[in-house]
Image (spheres, helix red, strand yellow):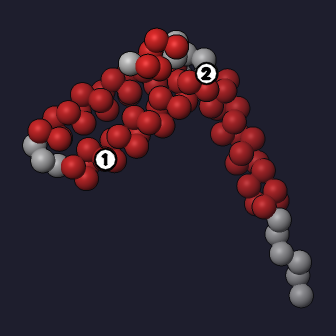
Amino acid sequence: MERPLTYGEMFKAQEKQFSHYNFEYADVAGLRRNFDDYEREIAVLIKAGHYLPAYDLVMKCSHSFNLLDARGAISVSERVA
């Protein structure tokens, strides 16, 4: 019987690559554009009553925000806003 794979064997390379992307390579200007575009589109979708696609964009908006924060591209005052 083969031994089971460990979490590290399965996901270490993925975590390393995404960490490098998140903290070093993520395009800050592109992430800001995405965040702003998602935020505008969310408002349109909510007004139209399309809450499921709006929710999907909220999740993308949140992810963009988190990447911007990881890159140190969000000021304290921007975080509050």
Residue 55 is marked as: 1
Q: Outermost residue toward the bottom?
A: 1
User: Can you give x and y, in whole percent of width and height, for residue 77 in the image?
Assistant: 46, 12
Which residue: 35% across, 40% down? 58
| Cα–Cα gap, marks 2 and 1 | 24 Å
Q: Outermost residue toward the left?
A: 48
How many callouts does the rendering have? 2
Q: Amino acid at mark 2?
A: Arg
Q: In the image, 63: left or right of 35?
A: right
Viewer-nearest residue: 20 or 70: 70
Q: In the image, 64: left or right of 49?
A: right
Which residue: 21% across, 49% down? 51
Q: Residues within 10 Å of mark 2 (few under 14, many from 20)?
A: some
Viewer-nearest residue: 21 or 52: 52
Q: In the image, 76: left or right of 56?
A: right
The quarter of the image holding the C terminus is: top left
Q: In the image, 8: left or right of 62?
A: right
Residue linked to disc 2: 71
Residue 6 is marked as: none
Q: Outermost residue toward the front?
A: 80
- Report if residue 25 is visible in the image: no
Q: Amino acid at mark 1?
A: Tyr
- Report if residue 39 is visible in the image: yes
